[in-house]
Amino acid sequence: MSTQTRPAPATLPVTLADVQAAHARIAAQIVRTPFFISRTLSALTGATVYLKFENLQFTAAYKERGALNTLLQLNADTLGVIAASAGNHAQGLAYHANRLGIPATIVMPTNTPTVKVTQTEGHGATVVLHGDTFDAAYAHARELEATGGLTFVHPFDDVRVIAGQGTVAIEMLEDVPAIDTFLTPIGGGGLISGMAVVASAASQAPGGHPIEVIGVEAELFPSMYNRIKGTQMPCAGDTLAEGIAVKEPGAITAQMVEALVDDIVLVSERSLEQAVSLLLQIEKTVVEGAGAAGLAALLQHPERFAGKTVGVVLCGGNIDTRLLANVLLRDLARSGRLARLRIRLQDQPGALFNVARIFEQQRVNILELAHQRIFTNLPAKGLSLEVECETRDKDHLDRLLAALRDSGYTVSTIELG
């Protein structure tokens, strides 16, 4: 929706006054995270790119904001809070509830990785494992809410949570008033709803300028995209951005996104992987797949944001270290700095030495070798040699391939999907 035709924020469930009150309430108890320009990413994408480092919150995610704003508005006689979450909401709620002396119970599916259970318990919460799916865990949490007299804290479909998340935008505009585009990941929609309230009010303020609000979803989980655009694309798959892999957006957030958000773009898994890798290489910061979604949109849709002054929220940094290692290695392979080659050799003395000499001449480092004599369709006197190697860049790899072929070798690259 155009910024000129947006409804006034006061007509929606969360207003600018709500977000401002939330910021006053929580500011002293959260990290005011940096909001810096990235000159390298700006040059790479054609936009002026500012990054909001919400991955530097204590629990490494913006979710603390909404959780804390909710906790600080509970009645003094509350018996405790409960939530269903295996992700950043669980961490943020558990951490701040423990700080405030409020008992917290988190219901997680039984297949939740042990590290997430341990981290949540480490913040002082009681973890209940129930069901094989999030829906089962959610239903059980609502049962415990009723039987235990607890207060349920929804990860996104709660006006207090939305107002808390919107405080990200207040800080961004205070630091860089020239921002004309917010590029924000969407899971359930809490973060973008709160930010859009701030953007809408700033756009309509005297002397203000239009601020576009663009949401980003993974192509595998276009739930809010479907809701707003009337499409019926499937929501399923193993996405790197599990933090925004939500099948059903909230009722409140869908209303606010429809009213205030200008557009939603989808990003591929490849773009998400590239964004995670670039943020580590260029900005030296660890970001999870969902947190890298904004940069992924800039990389995949550069024409959409060319010339804009864009504020990107790095909403979380909780990524499994083994998964991060895989992402980085795959990015090296796609950029030509790592390669796996399949070379046809004759099974005779000196064959390996002769091919290795070409690698040495081209100054290419060999990391791993594997011979295959049996499971191959080559003649009995032939063998297949697989070589994993390290090059400077794609041009360097191309020179190696040319040198091998010039020497009479049949060689092919084993490509990533």
Image (cartoon, grey):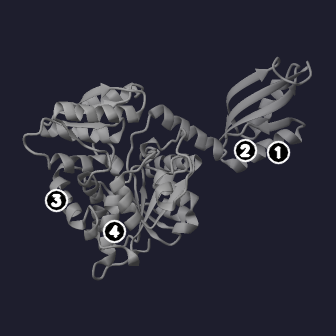
Q: Quadrant of the C terminus?
A: top right
Disc 3 to disc 4, C-alpha distance: 18 Å
Percent x, y of residue 273:
54, 45
Q: Is residue 103 left or right of residue 66?
A: left
Residue underneath mark 2: 397
- Check contact, mark 3 vs mark 4: CB within 8 A: no
Q: Is residue 225 left or right of residue 196?
A: right
Tag 3: amino acid? Ala
Tag 1: amino acid? Ala
| Res 153 quadrant in image | top left
**Mark positioned earlier in the residue sequence (3 or 1):** 3
Residue underneath mark 4: 199
- Check contact, mark 3 vs mark 1: CB within 8 A: no
- Residue placed farthest to the bottom in the image? 207
Give the structural element (helix, strand or loop) at label 1.
Answer: helix
Circle nearer the viewer, 4 or 1: 4
